[in-house]
Image (tube, grey):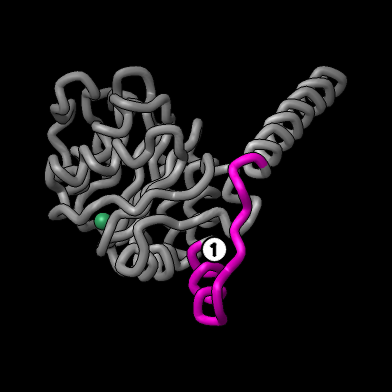
Amino acid sequence: MVKSPMQLEAERRAICEACRAMHAAELVVNTSGNISVRAGNLVAITPNGIPYESMQPGDVCLIDLDTGNEIENGLRPSSELPLHLAVYRSTDAGAIVHTHSLYATTLSTLVDELPAIHYQIADLGGPIRVMPYATFGSDALAASTAAGLADRRGVLMKNHGSTTIGPDLKRALTRAILLEWLCHVFYLARAGGSPSVLDAEEIGRVAANQARNAEQRERRLADRARKGS
Ligand SMILES: [Zn+2]
């Protein structure tokens, strides 16, 4: 019998690799956290409760974004599936990373907003909202997390953790690491006194510079690829 090809195999493989990277970066403990990628009207998402070190592409679940239904009878998807679907339906995200990283979770219990204490927060869209607590896996948590990502690429969830988005998995994961670092910096700064904060004008200037740099990088990479071919 000929084995049928695996749907979204590259995306599922990328999710397994990102899970191991997320674990290695100490953004999650045990099997907490979850990751997904959007491809057309399909969402590939981590399964529920499978250890990251042993996760295989075939373990990753596929969901129809329009209906929310699984398209294969495989493992149970992450309990935060409603959150991932709500974020895809309300943003142009290509990938989502949700973690319980140490300083993001710590700060989520202490403040209502992560202010612009470092210029790199511009990559996340500015000061980060801390959204109200709701039970994990609930529609209320899905709705508030999606709302917290309006004009932002990262959000903190009170007494829970963080969620970041990106056009692809690499950017979503990079932003999860950045958000955790910003939370760490803010926590240390607050322990030492009253941190100074950058204003919206400066964050806008940095965001414009970041966009220009990204554009130049893309152009140079494209030029190099053309010359190399
Ligand atoms: Zn969680």
In this rendering, position of residue 82 left or right of residue 127: left
Which quadrant of the figure contains the C terminus? top right
Under mark 1, the amino acid is Trp
Judging depth in this view, the residue of 117 and 35 nearest the camera is: 117
The residue depicted at 44 percent of the width and 33 percent of the height is: 151
Work out whether residue 131 can be spotted: yes
Tell which residue pokes out farthest to the right in this image.
227
Residue 168, percent across and down? 50, 34
Judging depth in this view, the residue of 22 and 71 nearest the camera is: 22
Which quadrant of the figure contains the N terminus? top left
In this rendering, position of residue 62 left or right of residue 217: left
In this rendering, position of residue 120 left or right of residue 136: right
Task: Name the quadrant containing residue 158.
Answer: bottom left
The residue depicted at 46 percent of the width and 40 percent of the height is: 153
The stretch of residues the image draws in magenta is: 183-201
The residue depicted at 35 percent of the width and 50 percent of the height is: 98
Is 4 a magenta residue?
A: no
State whether the magenta stretch is mostly helix, strand or loop: helix
Residue 28, percent across and down? 37, 64
Task: Name the quadrant containing residue 92.
Answer: top left
Residue tagged 1: 181
Work out whether residue 28 can be spotted: no
Task: Name the quadrant containing residue 7.
Answer: top left
The residue depicted at 31 percent of the width and 56 percent of the height is: 33
Secondary structure of residue under mark 1: helix
Residue 2, percent across and down? 28, 23
Is 194 a magenta residue?
A: yes
